Each structure stands twice: as C-alpha cells, then as structure tokens.
Image: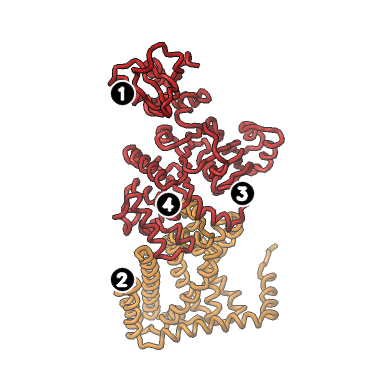
Amino acid sequence: MTQTDTSDVLIDCQSVWKVFGDRSREAIGAITQRGLGKQEVLREFGCVVGVSDASIQVRRGEIFCIMGLSGSGKSTLIRLLNRLIEPSLGQVKVKGRDVAAMDAATLRETRARHIGMVFQSVALLPQRTVLENAAFGLEVQGVSRDERNRAASAALDKVGLSDWKARYPSELSGGMQQRVGLARALTSDPEIILMDEPFSALDPLIRRQLQDEFRQLTKDLGKSAVFITHDLDEAIRIGDRIAIMKDGVIIQTGTAEEIVMNPADQYVADFVAGISRLHLIKAHSVMISAGQWQGAVDGLPRCSPEADIDALIGQITETGSDAIAVEEDGKLVGIVTIRNLLLGVRGDADASAH
Amino acid sequence: MTFNPGAFLAPVVDWLNANFHGFFALITKAIEAVLGTIEGALLVLPPYGLIALVAVAAFFAAGLRVAILSACCLGFCWLMGLWTGSMQTIALVVVAVAIAVAIAFPLGILAARRPRVEAALRPILDVMQTVPPWVYLIPAVMIFSLGKVPAIIATIVYGVPPMLRLTTLAFRGVPKDLKELGEAIGAKPGTILWKIEFPAATPTLLVGLNQCILLSLAMVVLAGLVGAGGLGAEVTRGLTRMEMGLGLRAGLAIVAVALLMDRLSRGALERGSRRKQAG
C-alpha cells in the first residue's frame, strides 16, 4: 500500500496488551521479560489475555474495520482506544497524544471532543427525548441549551430522523434507535467515531441500509471511524481497511481485496472462502503484463486498474473480446484475459503472471 | 456462666452522658427546633385550610387521584378528633425520614461502588433490622431522656437499613452500557451520577423511600411509649386504659397518615421524573 504521512495517522496503537485477572501485573512482567504467550499466561497466572500485542493505525478519513468472532478481543481493543479500558502494556496515541498519559480532565476533554462512540446496545437514556439524547454529549460539556439543540437537530437531520425529535427512544424501532446513537456521536463533531458492533442486533435488511448510509455519511462528513463487527460481509461493505482478530491477536490487516487474495493463514482463508469476489477484486490484481499477451492490444476494450471483476465481465460479454487492456493515465499497464477473470472470481491471481 | 453485655454497655452510656452531655443537648435542641417548626407550620392553619392546601398541592404535584385521596386521609384524621396528634406524627416521620435518607443515600451509593464497604455494612444492617425496635429505645432514652428526640433517633436507626439496601440495589442495577456511555462522552463522575445513574435508579430508590417512610411511621407509633406524642401516644393511652375505641381510632388514623405519605411521596416523585422527560 501507499506510504502515508505520519501526521495523517489519527489513532496509533502500538503493541497493546490487555490482561485481565488478579495477577495481571505479574503476568505482564512475565510477558515482557520471558515473552510468554496467551496460553502460558493463562496456565501460570490464571489471567485471561484479552488483547495480545495488537498494533493498528487508523488514518485520517478512513473507515477501519476490526473483524472477529465473539471472544476475539475486538470489543476490548476498541475500548483501549479511548481508555474505557486501561491498557496493560503498549501505547495508544490519539492525534499524536498518548492516551495513557492523560490526566482525568484531559481524558474527558479528548473523549468529549475528539472521539465519538456508538454502542451495540445503543445506550439511549429512556427518560429523554430523541433530541435530548442526541444533545446529551454537548449537555455534559456544559453547552447552552439552544446551541446543543441546534447541533443535535442538525445531526438528527443527517441520519434521517427529523420527524422524531420529540419522541422517546421506546417509540422507535431498533434501526431508528441506532440512528439516534449515531446522531449523538456526530453532534459533538468528533473527528473519530468508534463503532462497537452497532448494527449487529438489527435485522439484515435494515442492517444493509444502515451500513450504506453510515459509509456515505462518514465519507461526506470526512470522519474517520473504527468499526467493530463479527460479520466479514459487513467489514467488506463498510471498511477501507480490515483487521482480522482471533484470540486477542490481529492476524491480518489490509484492504478487503488484499485479505481475500492473500489470506495470512488457514483461519482467514476459511473465512473469506464464501465471500463473493465480483466487486472486491480489481483489474490490477488479476492482470498479466502486456508482454505475456500474444494478441493485438489496439482493438481491445479499455478499463482502469480499479475496475472490479464484475465490470470487466460486463465489458467482455458486451464486446465479445477475449481480453481487456488495463490503462492508467493513458498508459497500458497490463492485460486481463478471460482466464484471469475466471481465476479472479475464485480469488486467485494468475500464477503464470508472476 | 452468663455474659451480660449490659454490664459493659451501661458504663459506656454513662460515660457518654457525663462527657458529651453538651453535644447531646445540642442534638436535642436542633431536632426539637426543626420538629417544632414543622409541627407549628402544620398547625398554624385550621384543619380545613390545611386539607385544602394539601389537596391543591397534591393536585399539581401528583394529579387528581392523589389529591382526592390526600384530602380524604386528612379529613379522616380530623373527623376522628386526632388532628393535632396526626400532625405531630407527620412531623416526626418527615424529620426522621429526611435524616435517614441523608445517611442512607450516600452510604448506599458507596456500597454499590465498593464491595468491601457493602460487606462491612451488611452485618450491621442485619442487626439493625432484626433487633426488636424497643431495644433501640433503651439507650436512646438513656442518652436523650424521654420525649421526641429518642423517638426520632430510634426511628432513624430503623429507617436507614431498607433505604440503604435499596439504594445499593438501585445503583448496582443501572445498566453498565449507560455508565460506559457517560464515560465515553467525557462526562464527569458527578454528571454520570446525577444525569445517568440517578434517573435509571429512581424506580428502585422510590421503593426504598416508600419502605423507609412506612417503617418509620411504624416506629414513631411505637415510640409513643417513650413520650414521643402524636398518634403513638393515643395508641399507648388506649392500650394502658384498655379503651378499644381510642385504640381503634388512633390505629385507623395511622393507616390514613401512612396512605397519605406513601401516595403523596410516590406520586410527587414519579411525576417529577416524568416531567423531566417532557421538559
């Protein structure tokens, strides 16, 4: 991937560990000095390792998904980012500042202004209206009623709840409640939004709709998000990059395409086996170099390196051509043949191309 | 061989009396002053005036049903000829409950946050609740002599446990995700307490307050034995003279006062939390 400027890293999480249990301090000592693993720590100290040596970097403007099954430590990891859980070891920097070093007031300030959070359980206050719930973040910051209601109102408009401001949470459906949760996070205009399995409890149709809306909204507003999910489809739909977690360890980080094309181990491979490649895999991943193509290049249809397989299949079937020329800035960079496309549908690159 | 705790306690009480007389006298003065003020305020209006006032206040605070019920309860006490006694009892209960809540509420929250505090408090509360209430009256009378103050002290001892236990239960029952929300949006601990935990805990807290009021009322009546006055004195008089009529009238007046305080406090608090939603 392209190298990014370090100032563009909003959340920098370096080798973070979280060990739960009465003897966690000793266990951490053993981990740093003797390099113990998760199993040994459990055996020797009776401590559960929630997150083990996790490093992630969330860049400005991206949606970073953390995908893992229940018990994989993903919910713990996201809480380490805003220090709802204290890391046992390692460093978390938010916008360049070490979260662990902040005093209580600075930490509150950072949470209030820079990091919004949306919960799986939504966590709306039942005795407050939708508007009051959305304004709650600003209310605890001491913002005046007029001002916070204006901001909350604008956020509720963005999530499509303009007509529901005076209602109570119990009058709303699950999907609408989660929109209120999102509006509440947006109201204080933070640059980073932490999403802890926000759509997991919703039914599939509503979930899909909210996924698309959430992605659109995040991109429109220029926010960055860390999105936790147990659903790989969801991670692929929403995330710019995905980290896959298992047993507290991040196994692989990359774009959906990278993960599907080059799974780091059998676990990831099994996971991605059922994922449709059609919209995931792009021309540049399956193309062969122009030199390997024997036929004429001039008559071939053209496409960009970022065109997905689905579009390429469309082009092939429409034009009846055997191959497509991949062009970037008017220059030929490669050729995609029908054979490449078929391999791509299975998630493989053409071995003969390398 | 027998063990006589009184042999150890009596000198302690004597010593307290001898050395802290000024302190206890001050407490007595303070409580009597507050009680006197409340009693005086309740008796300054003629009965029908106060009944009308309470009914109107109840209407605005808790609605029509509670207003009618309050008027009926107070009217009953007046008709039974026990107006002054009823007012004295109400004043006693109000003061005792206010002090009991002031003690139990913060301790209850502390116990909900720290399991060790709860573990330390639990046996004390068990003793406070199971020792027959007469027993409290003895040291209370020894220190504060006869009258209303020992009655209030004994009532507080009796009223604190239910309020404290239910406060702990209420705060422990606040959903974890709501507290987490408070932290995640950068709220101060005090803000989390009052804006998130307290509203969520209110229903259970109301049960606690209710229990506190009713148990205090029972104790205040019992304290008629030590000269607390009010309806308790009427019951004691009925008992000692074997006057069935007086005992029954006083008993029913106590029921009326209990109903009044229960519905009024609950209605006002429920309405209060509902109005906060709407506002």
Residue B48 pos. (x, y %): 32, 85
Residue, disc 4: A186
Colour for chain A in the figure: red
Label 1 packing within 10 angstroms: few (<14), some (14-19), many (20+): few
Pointer 4 or 1: first along the chain: 4
Please report contact status of discs 3 and 4: CB closer than 8 Å, yes or no: no
The chain letter for the residue carrying disc 4 is A
Label 2 packing within 10 angstroms: few (<14), some (14-19), many (20+): some
The residues bearing labels 4 and 2 have C-alpha atoms spaced at a distance of: 39 Å
The residues bearing labels 3 and 2 have C-alpha atoms spaced at a distance of: 52 Å
Tell me, for residue A100, which label it has, or none: 3
Label 4 packing within 10 angstroms: few (<14), some (14-19), many (20+): many
* 1 vs 3, front mark: 1
Mark 2 residue type:
Gly
Helix, strand or loop under label 3: helix
Have a look at marks 4 and 1 and say if they share a chain: yes
The chain letter for the residue carrying disc 3 is A
